[in-house]
Image: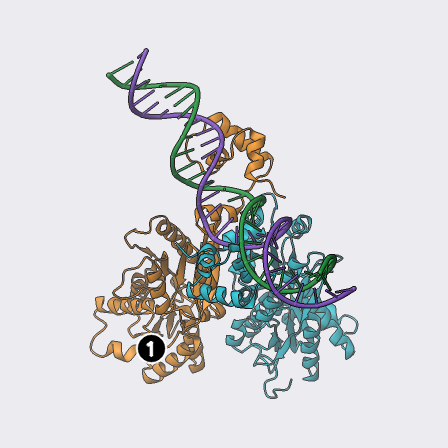
Chain colours: A cyan, B orange, C purple, D green
Amino acid sequence: MATTIKDIAKKAGVSISTVSLVLNRKGYVAPETKERISSVMKQMNYKPLHSARKLATQKTGNIGYIIWEGHFSEVEMFYSQIFLGMEYAARKSDSYILLTTVKEDFDPKNDLPRFLKYNDVDGVALAGRVSHALIEYLDNQQLPFVLIDYELPGKSFNCVKIDNYNGAFRAVENLVLADKKHIAFIGGTFFHPSIKERYRGYREALEKYNLANDGYLKKYSYCENIETSRAIGENGATKLLNRHPEIDAIFCCNDTTAMGVITGIQKIGKRIPQEIAVVGFDDIPPAEYNIPKLSTLRVPKLEIGKQAFMLLNELINNPNMVPQTRMISVDLVIRESSHSESNER
Amino acid sequence: MATTIKDIAKKAGVSISTVSLVLNRKGYVAPETKERISSVMKQMNYKPLHSARKLATQKTGNIGYIIWEGHFSEVEMFYSQIFLGMEYAARKSDSYILLTTVKEDFDPKNDLPRFLKYNDVDGVALAGRVSHALIEYLDNQQLPFVLIDYELPGKSFNCVKIDNYNGAFRAVENLVLADKKHIAFIGGTFFHPSIKERYRGYREALEKYNLANDGYLKKYSYCENIETSRAIGENGATKLLNRHPEIDAIFCCNDTTAMGVITGIQKIGKRIPQEIAVVGFDDIPPAEYNIPKLSTLRVPKLEIGKQAFMLLNELINNPNMVPQTRMISVDLVIRESSHSESNER
DNA sequence: TTGATTTATCGAAACGTTTTAATATATTTT
DNA sequence: AAAATATATTAAAACGTTTCGATAAATCAA
């Protein structure tokens, strides 16, 4: 059997309570006894038993990470990286992240993740687009939660957001400054607020340079109202370029779409970036290995995970906290798919 | 406060012990009382508190999933998919998978995952190539563990293996039957036993058709003694094809390498698959989106995760079990990168 | 009928912590 | 010097389960 708090108490010649006090850095305990107890603990390699501690404190020490099934099992390493960022942060506070996926048509009655059913988490992080029914459920249960890269219009929840607007704005401005005249947008469902914001950045950058006149936006935007994918990119590029051969740049709602766009352009036979520049968003790992290498906006995924963890922890310790939004900024990284010669930023 | 076993006992007019018995399907309890207790539990929406249960049973209900940092944070969705398979399986038995990464130069003294340090898991799964120091540590601690897609020569541990040999054999045989005469192998470090086995499958398939005479293997094999990557593939293809332009097929140790190989071939300007066929191994998601689509061996990752979970569970319940190896077979899936016209299998 | 076995239920101890309230001593304030 | 406060330690209760052994009733075997 492993050594318990009793063993420590006996060996150090004090009561259990005193040991517990030094363990939790609480109350008064004389420096010398504290020292003695600490050394005994180290010597006997004592580790408090979590389940006992949890039973006594009524906390679980776990936090849940919920992600839509499609996000985790598909090509994207995006949300997995955010998870990893949370895991790194969790190490420091000795808590665990329990990851689970939910289906798109989530029903709280039947599909409740087991850590919610059994109250095995102190709080949850919801990554990306996730069922509103689930958010509502958590809100009703008064369980602390944060949204990552998602939000609900009209509602103010705790969330960690990507600075989609400014990122998009900067990317498109950069294309304009590189003398591109007909800049298209290809994307997926606006149901995801991030994509909406990226589109807004696109539009307002064009407006700043008085490019977005009359039918410009309508002509050069292609969005399918479904989850983003390579297919959308390829379709979009094909249709848009056939209809409007003057297009000389495409800003995509994310890297996955952008890689599809590149495929589409290659099939048509135009050169990237000389004839058409392509810029994505997210900087998922494949972006760097794509041919040509994809210019994109680097989203610091590990940092997002860390911020989400910290915010959630604050919330757990202070449930009545006024809802916060943490905005994470992004970097434009220019690779081969835009700006052949100059490497300006 | 949530309802406890006490509340149930009181409402059902029985003792705590009896409730516990029906909860755990143990001992004798009259059908009618069992029925009554069950209905009260349902009615009051009773969920046993895990921490209390764990304290009493001295089990954690958790299992750890350890993976080398590079495997998780890189492009590959391979080991994350296996993780997902374990998570699916874990749902049924209400246990949790705690994922953590370890560094390559793992030192048990300093880098011990916290769930090992605090005994928060009943067992662990080690995915892919992982520090031998860690395996040794677990073995010494007598903590149940399984190796996934890895093994130690000479030692017999519980493991879930991919049928690398037969997969490779079949793939290469298929190339031979498609009339390819000069079939190369490109791979990474043989330190990973899977790669070694894949090479063996390659070699023996050639031997079966009497192709692997004199210097054939030496001439047409390219392996760098480092972790596999696109770079290895590209380098290998470039060097091999410059030296031996007669090469008409390349079998790669995995998809990542294969995608690099394709890049290399494209830069040289040969056509795939007409002039050179390429086959990978693993069927990671990008394989399907690659251009051309990559022929490969489909490894059922979710199934591997499930098998690992089940094996580990058996081991936990019966620690003295004789070490088992579960072999998971693979399917050859032909896409565009080999066999242009016929779709034979 | 008696004794043995099976069926059914329960009381109480155990699991390893935290925390509250009590006690005792030392120090400061009046 | 008494009262108030700060410092130091502890006993005991509490957290919600499981499980062991006891007890009692019902069934079976002789």
State the image coordinates of residue A26 (x, y, percent, origin top left): 60, 61
Q: Give the left or right position of residue A341, taking residue B155 as reference.
A: right
Q: Quadrant of the C terminus of chain A?
A: bottom right
In the image, residue A178 above or below residue B301: below
Residue A99 appears anywhere in the view: yes
The 10 Å Cα crowd at callout 1, few under 14, some 14 to 19, many 20 or more, is some
A225 and C9: which is toward the camera? C9
Q: Residue at x 61, y 56 (%)?
A: A123
Tell me where residue B156 sits by quadrant: bottom left
Q: Residue at x 49, y 58 (%)?
A: A48
In the image, residue B87 above or below residue D15: below
State the image coordinates of residue B103 (x, y, percent, origin top left): 44, 71
Residue A103 appears anywhere in the view: no
Q: Give the left or right position of residue A137, taking residue A85 as reference.
A: right
Q: Amino acid at mark 1?
A: Cys
Q: Which residue is mark 1?
A: B223
Q: Give the left or right position of residue A57, taking residue A168 as reference.
A: left
